[in-house]
Image (cartoon, rainbow, N blue to C red):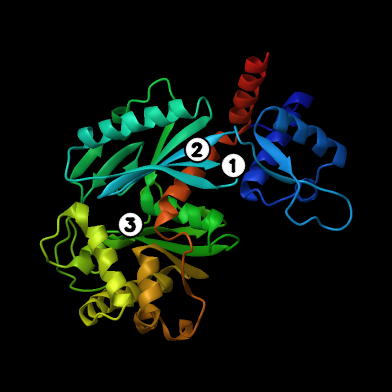
Amino acid sequence: MHAPTTSSELRLHNLTRLLRAVHAGGGELTRSQLTRDLGLARGTATVLMGELVSAGMVREQPPAERPRGRPTQLVGPHPHGPVALAVDLREDSWSISAAELGGASRLLECRHLTAGLASEVLAALSEALRGRVADLAGRVVGVGVAVPAAVRDGRMIDAIHLGWHDVDLISLLRLDGGPAVMIGNDAGLAALAEARRGGLRGVDFGLHLHVSLGVGGALVVGGRPLAGAHGVAGEFGHLPLAGDPHAACPCGSAGCWDLDVGANALVGKRDVPVHRRLHHAGELITRAAAGDAGSVRAVERVATALGRGIGSLVNAHDPRTVTLSGLGAQIYEVAAPVVIAGCEERLMAFRRGDPGLIAASRLGVAAPRVGTAEMVFDAFLTTEGVAAWRDRVTAEGG
């Protein structure tokens, strides 16, 4: 975006800055705080806020507890304002959530999957999305889809466990004429969520790991996950960080960490279909938390491998903290001492003894859909996106 050179461009630039700050603040900042944080004159902030309210993007409400001094208003999402649709496509299900400015979201729909062709699964998802877009009557500013696959140039390159390869998801969803569709790797989007709404917010250099059937994630630097030269960084599950270095992995490599961490490792060699493994693994962790001896052994085996891999990654990347989402958070909550012991076993001696190095994400299994909504709002909260919404509302009002 070029620097604003006219008064109208400057006004739109400041509107966008203000709206981004409202979103980043989670609807918990007052007009006074936003004015101060953005370095705006009070009169300018009043005019800009009035324009955003008139455009149906935000609304102001008194806080639950009134502070002393000058009255002020909390600034949050308008009840008929912009919405991001976030799809979390997993090996066993897909879900659709609607997120407002500020990050609050609600689950709209969830369907469980059995084995199926990409075209069949995505046709059903497309139909559901078209219905949700229609229900929200012009409020949807974009659709984001988190997928358990490497993603490049808008295509699913390799969804190993689904058996889908080089899938043009955006075309198969067939939302032509509707809101733009974006796609991202689920673990990378979980890292984005952790940077914006979780334990890596404000952390200068962190590592996030999302555990599902396997494990992936991203380095987060200055609040941004690193995507790599081709957009496919963070495939940590396909490094030889634990276990048998010669064991074959479905990805085509050998000795992958994925073979020892995640739902596949928890379930083991039992005859459990792909679309049941996450559920089965979750039940096993629940039984371990209740003290079932066999389940405890299974979880501790995976927890040790998880910790060892974390230790190796910490040696390589030197993050300030490591956060875990998905099954990783659940495993850590049940077997934190085992994860920590495995990590310390692999750490260089001078790194050992940091009690705050590893933390479970409070976002848990929801991390990919939270990050997906953030991806959509990143695309919308530009001068072009804000201007398009404002101009449409103005035209409809006229």
Asked if residue 254 can be seen in this view, the reply is yes
Looking at the rendered image, the quarter that the N terminus falls into is top right
Of discs 3 and 1, which sits in the foreground?
1
Dots 2, 3 in contact, CB < 8 A: no
> In this figure, which residue is indicated by the disc labeled 2?
84
Give the CA distance from mark 2 to mark 3.
27 Å
Q: Which residue is mark 1?
A: 101
Circle nearer the N terminus (3, 1): 1
Q: Position of residue 54 (x, y in %)?
A: 72, 28
Callout 2: few (<14), some (14-19), or many (20+) C-alpha neighbours within 10 Å? many
User: Which image quadrant: the C terminus?
Assistant: top right
Relative height, residue 144 to residue 356 (above, below): above
Q: Vertically, is 154 above or below 176?
A: below
Q: Residue at x 50, y 37 (%)?
A: 84
**Viewer-nearest of discs 2 and 3:** 2
Disc 3 marks a residue whose amino acid type is Glu
Q: Quadrant of residue 181?
A: top left
Q: Amino acid at mark 1?
A: Leu
Is 55 displayed left or right of 337 in the figure? right
- Residue 30 is left or right of residue 371, and the answer is right
Instruction: Work out whether residue 255 can be spotted.
Output: no
| Sequence order check, earlier mark of 2 and 1 | 2
CB under 8 Å between discs 2 and 1 = no
Q: Is residue 301 left or right of residue 228?
A: left
